[in-house]
Image: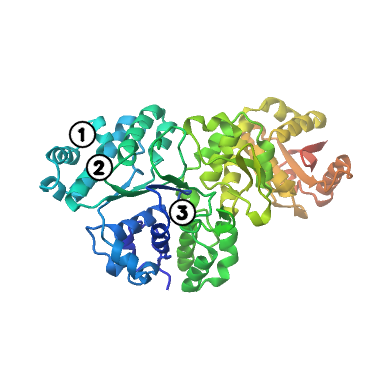
Amino acid sequence: MFKSGIGIDNFRKFIELKRTYVDKTQFIESFINSDYPEVALFTRPRRFGKTLTISMLEEFFNINKNSIDLFKDLEISKNKQICSEWMNKYPVINISLKQVNKLSYTKSLDNFSIIISNICLNNQFLIQSSKVDEDDRHLLQIFKQRKASEADLGQSLYVLCRALNFHFEKPVILLLDEYDVPLNYAWQYNYYQEMLDFIRDLFGFALKGNEYLKFAIITGCLRISKESIFTGVNNFTCFSISQSDYAETFGFTDAEVDRLLELAQLTHKKKEIKAWYDGYCFGENSSIYCPWDVVNYLRSLKNNPKIQPQNYWLNSSSNDIIKDFIKYCNFDVNDKLETLLNHGAIPCKIDDNLTYGNIYNSETNLWNLFYNTGYLTKLKNSELQDYNFQGFRKELLKIPNSEIESIFIDVVEDWFKQRIKSINNVELVKAFWNGDSQKFTSIISDILLKTISYYDYHENYYHAFLVGIFSALGYTVKSNLESGVGRSDILITDANINYKIGACIEVKRVEDSSESLQNKALDALAQIQKNKYYVSLSEKNLQIVKWGIAFYKKSCIAICQLS
């Protein structure tokens, strides 16, 4: 039976509540048996199981815990040697920087102080331990009481490592989750340099030449190295989404999703789940599902078997980066966005080393931000042949699945509505109601050229395009209504502007350039007349403006007939 663990990122609680756990404990064996680095950074998009994995690692390694029962039915338990040598054998610091996310540097630092205080409270024995240096015990007391200075907080992880090492006489394993969140928020709210200096000190003390450290495992969305956060850290390795190592550690594989569907007795939903939540390429050829989405949808299906796939990512992550990209970007990216929204792919040099301060300095940085945060993914090697370009790998990027596509479309539509408000509405409205075909065609064509389109120019796109324009202008717009003897495309009225007039629009799409836009627009007008789409307007004694509009890609001709 499938039992959802949504919202539970504590491994012990997850197992003890008997939630359905996708076994990722093989990661422990793979990491230990490898030539593991002293500092390992794993970058993955949000909602790919990083925090639960970090919690699992803490339960396995932490000397203060007894975890035999938690792991007895999991894959790692089969390796008796590793369990004997490593399970509950090392002091562990598990810290998440997820809450260091306030609108100012001072408030974010206060939150970090609370996090360190809680770690000290959970390890109060160190303050009393005769094995721990007296000065360190004094510092731990200050940390616990939240009276530490900024400089002292900068060395807090190092002091904790030293105290734990002295007490247990064993090196410390440091687990650091969501390491880049403080810099992300600092960048958004204009205290970036202050936070950068603090994080550089924090990591410098904890990771650079820390003789009390066994190893550190760090997770986040982006690798931020150009700011020299990890400068001087010996044996540092980043395992990004571009690399094959540990490609299947975070997220669900096809086989894992199949198993979940069997447990939930929902194998018939595989096609929908694959279309909506699969599609991420980590490494060379791995096909990965977003676990947050899969589990949420399975839980929803359990309560309502008829429910359609939902956009769960939208409710759990900020999509401001797409909005900012479209709103502030000065680069000519419309064509590339259209390619992506029409299920195509765009070339991009992949660079795992991003700098928040320089993200908007180049188009390439922006596409890389989308790639690293899960809004885009690369095509698999089986789909293309990679090649090198100026020392960087150049890949083809695409939207991974239907869920992310829907996010892009929502943001683009919102951007479009805002853009309509900024155009010369007076000229557009005047040409439309006066039946000035030439002027109206010119204005609509201009808007179309500057608009990010999608759905490969299907007729329903142009329909939505016109509905969006007149809705944004404040008119009452009704589309695809029963009117006359058929279904009219668009009817427009507005009692507040001019209660005596209404409009009926029929939209046509030309299939190829050999067809005449002029003839297609006239056909649209003839269809209005033949099927009497305007009857509902006539019944209100309105003067009627009839428009036949034909589109081909980003060209159009609009022809009016006044009653």
Residue bearing the label numbered 1: 148
How dense is the environment of label 3, judged by Cα within 10 Å: few (below 14), some, or many (20 and up)?
many
| Real-space CA distance between mark 1 and mark 3, rounded to the nearest whole angstrom | 34 Å
The type of residue carrying mark 1 is Ala
Whether pointer 1 and pointer 3 mark residues with C-beta atoms closer than 8 Å, the reply is: no
Nearest the viewer among 449 and 160 is 160
**SS category of the residue bearing label 3:** loop
**SS category of the residue bearing label 2:** helix
The type of residue carrying mark 2 is Ile
**SS category of the residue bearing label 1:** loop
Q: Any mark on residue 188, and which?
A: none
**Position of residue 407 measured from the top left corner of the image (x, y, whole percent):** 56, 47
| Real-space CA distance between mark 2 and mark 1, rounded to the nearest whole angstrom | 10 Å
Tally of marks = 3
First in sequence, mark 2 or 3: give its number. 3
Residue bearing the label numbered 2: 116
Side (left or right) of 447 relative to 415: right
Nearest the viewer among 7 and 548 is 7
Q: Is residue 17 visible?
A: no
Residue at x 76%, y 46% (from the top left corner): 534
- Asked if residue 495 is positioned above or below residue 401 in the image, the reply reads above
